[in-house]
Image (tube, rainbow, N blue to C red):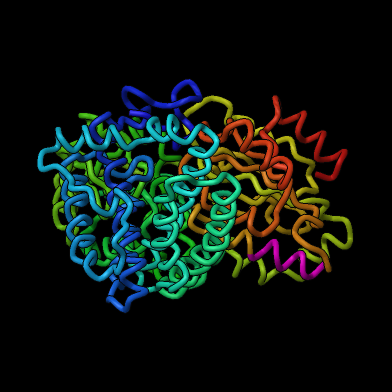
Amino acid sequence: MFCYQCEQTRKTTACTEKGVCAKTPEVAALQDLLLYTARGLAHVARRAGAAGAEISDVAPILGEALFTTVTNVNFDTETLKARIHAIAARRDALRAKAGSDVLPCSAAFVPAESIGDMVVQGDSLGIAMRQTRFGSDRTGMQELLTYGLKGVAAYAHHARILGQTDADVDAFLIEGLDILNDPAPAVDTLFGHAMRCGEISVKVLALLDGANTGRFGTPAPTPVRMGAIKGKAILVSGHDLADLMALLEQTEGTGINVYTHGEMLPAHGYPELKKHAHLAGHFGGAWMLQREEFAAFPGAIVMTTNCLMEPQPAYRDRLFTRGLVSFPGIPHLADGDFGPAIAAALAAEGFAEDTPNPRTHLVGFGHGAVLGIADSVIAAVTKGEIKRFMLIGGCDGAIGGRNYFTEMAAKAPKDWMILTLGCGKFRLTDLDLGEVAGLPRLLDMGQCNDSYSAVRVALALADAFGTDVNGLPLSLVISWYEQKAVCVLLALLFLGVKGIRLGPRLPAFITPAMLKVLVDRFDIKPIGASADEDLRTIQALGA
């Protein structure tokens, strides 16, 4: 096992025995084998498609394979085995139409029948092998592209569920995986492909934004009850709004209250979701607190996408997975029927009383809402009432150092407006930041899936002031955890955004040589030793 794809990687190098996420060496090996098999299908499909073969099903297959390997999604060797064999079968069905006698090994290898033998195959194909073969820099660049592709796949999967696709996005999922078959990749070439991934990342974020608003309406500022109401309850975590809608429809009239958890908090801003009166509020904080919070929740729990931690005995019997999420022994709601979760909620105790004096949190400041008040914002900047915008957001995590983000918001000058998105918002939601220029000083722009909102707002403000994004009084202070954050980072770099502060620590796959490239070209800044130090730098240099 050698895994360094997330921020909580052990000892800043790699997880080599068991992942901090609870991924076992067997699961890690099968995930490596899954990606290898997907590369083979991508190669064959790319050439078969050019020869006129029907390959419309390939991008969804590859997208699910990539999303399955995102941190905290799938921990189940049986489902991974089944997916590997299904991809190999689709690859073999297309191979005769590929029109090439020279195929990469990934397009011809035969996956073993037993999980044990498949683990051996996966162990021979992982990152450690490529580091020996290609060196750390080239392997790191391969991984940068791979993780960007994983993020693209995740966002495309969400959009596809809602009936929205993009031909360029689907084509790049195939092309990008095939690029990873290159037997002698050049670092500069791989970097160029990573920037191409950034371009596609912008497209897929826009695609998902349109899919969400098209189905659920444009988010509007909405106060969310951060506490419980007496009665039976179901908690929904992850990111999938379609699952939340289906659950709300299936629980209508049952007397069950539905609560959001983690990155589902922004769901309360969507008109088509909040019209359900039993969408009662939000329970808990970010994903890494779920063990304590799920144990304390007196109802059923549904995990819709990534962010699942190893389930604990206190709630295993009332936890359910959906979509690509899988954990051994946990019931999976494969067909969209939430009946088992509803039955578990009715059987559970539920909340004995209302949370006394619950606070509220204001969500719904997507680009639709913010651009609707753009004239007021622009006027406030022109008058000097708003001196700077600072985006503090991204992925939250368990590793120390993330209090930095809370301090940045708490200590920022009162004439700075704070934007936030992703579960990184939970570092700020307990703060009372007041108002600036008659507007809320903290604008919650949504999930990590809603990163396009921040892009749209920044581009609109830049246009209004006759500059580019780097000419705005805007600072980006980003916390990262998993691969969707890599996708968003590549999108920002493609758009030419410079001076991003990234932390709490840099990815382990970023080698010193790679970091030099990012610093030289994009002025990437690891977050400093303290929030005070970085705030002084921003104020002094206008960074």
Q: Residue at x 45, y 28 (%)?
A: 9
Q: Position of residue 210 (x, y in %)?
A: 49, 72
Horizontal arrangement in the rendering, residue 143 relative to residue 65 (left or right): right
Report the span colored magenta: 456-465
Q: Majority secondary structure of the magenta segment?
A: helix
Q: Residue at x 82, y 61 (%)?
A: 380
Residue 533 visible in the snapshot: yes
Of 449 and 319, the residue lying toward us: 449
Q: Is residue 28 magenta?
A: no
In which quadrant of the rendered image does the C terminus lie? top right
Q: Is residue 256 above or below residue 392?
A: below
Horizontal arrangement in the rendering, residue 90 relative to residue 186 (left or right): left
Of 288 and 181, the residue lying toward us: 181
Q: Is residue 460 magenta?
A: yes
Q: Residue at x 39, y 30 (%)?
A: 128
In which quadrant of the rendered image does the N terminus lie? top left
Q: Quadrant of residue 288?
A: top left
Of 120 and 27, the residue lying toward us: 120
